[in-house]
Image: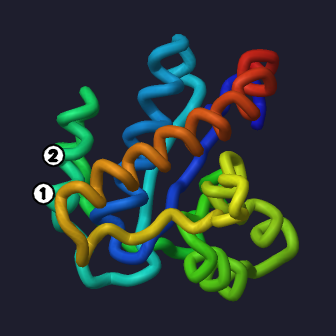
Amino acid sequence: MTASAPFRVVFVCTGNICRSPMAEVVFRWFAESVGLGDRIVSTSAGTGDWHVGEPADPRTIEALRRRGYDGTRHRARQFSDTDFDRNDLVIALDRSHERNLGAWARSDADSDKVLLLGSFDAPEDGGVDVPDPYYAGTEAFDEVLGMIESACRALFRQLEPAIRSAG
């Protein structure tokens, strides 16, 4: 990251309609809320192509709205190897995504960018996976959003000093 280039983070889940859009929006909010919105780019992608071009799941949009975020502009896309080139961090939402991303990495530099979101705010039981709410009810989306907010806050707190000093 140079002083003129923003720090880029891509959040990755399965279809890019539930967890990763939540993380993208929440992380961007943290950056904007402290005046770093121009120095951080937050995006998201899915490991699969099932939902490419679609908006986030309506339950995702509603969970975000209930907490004061706007997820309506999101359109799903699939992760590609150029995401390794464009981003400083590639954040997986669970260990299956982490394994996929590790297998797609073309170099040690790519592999080094892959981290688990839950590892920044792991509960005492050691669970680092953010569960997929897709097949669950509305309350699961709210619960998952809470987990994502907590982990994104921890990730942002770790990155903020370096981003501020680079600017």
Residue found 64% across the figure and 65% down from its top: 127
| Quarter holding residue 131 | bottom left
**For this view, does 104 lie left or right of residue 72?**
right
Any part of residue 55 in sight: no
Residue closer to the observer: 139 or 80: 139
Residue closer to the observer: 102 or 133: 133
Residue found 31% across the figure and 62% down from its top: 18
Residue 51 image point, x, y percent: 23, 76
Label 1, on which residue?
A: 58
Give the vertical position of 118 relative to 64 (above or below): below
| Quarter holding residue 7 | top right
Quadrant (top left/top right/bottom left/bottom right) for the C terminus:
top right
| Quarter holding residue 60 | bottom left
Label 2 element class: helix
Residue found 51% across the figure and 57% down from its top: 11
Residue 29: mark: none
Q: Are marks 2 and 1 in contact (CB under 8 Å)?
A: yes
Residue 61 image point, x, y percent: 19, 48
**For this view, does 26 lie left or right of residue 86?**
left
Amino acid at dot 2:
Glu
C-alpha gap between disc 2 and disc 1: 6 Å
Residue 62: mark: 2
Amino acid at dot 1:
Pro
Quadrant (top left/top right/bottom left/bottom right) for the N terminus:
top right
**For this view, does 75 lie left or right of residue 7?**
left
**For this view, does 25 lie left or right of residue 57?**
right
Residue 78 image point, x, y percent: 40, 74
Give the vertical position of 146 relative to 39 (above or below): below
Any part of residue 15 in sight: yes
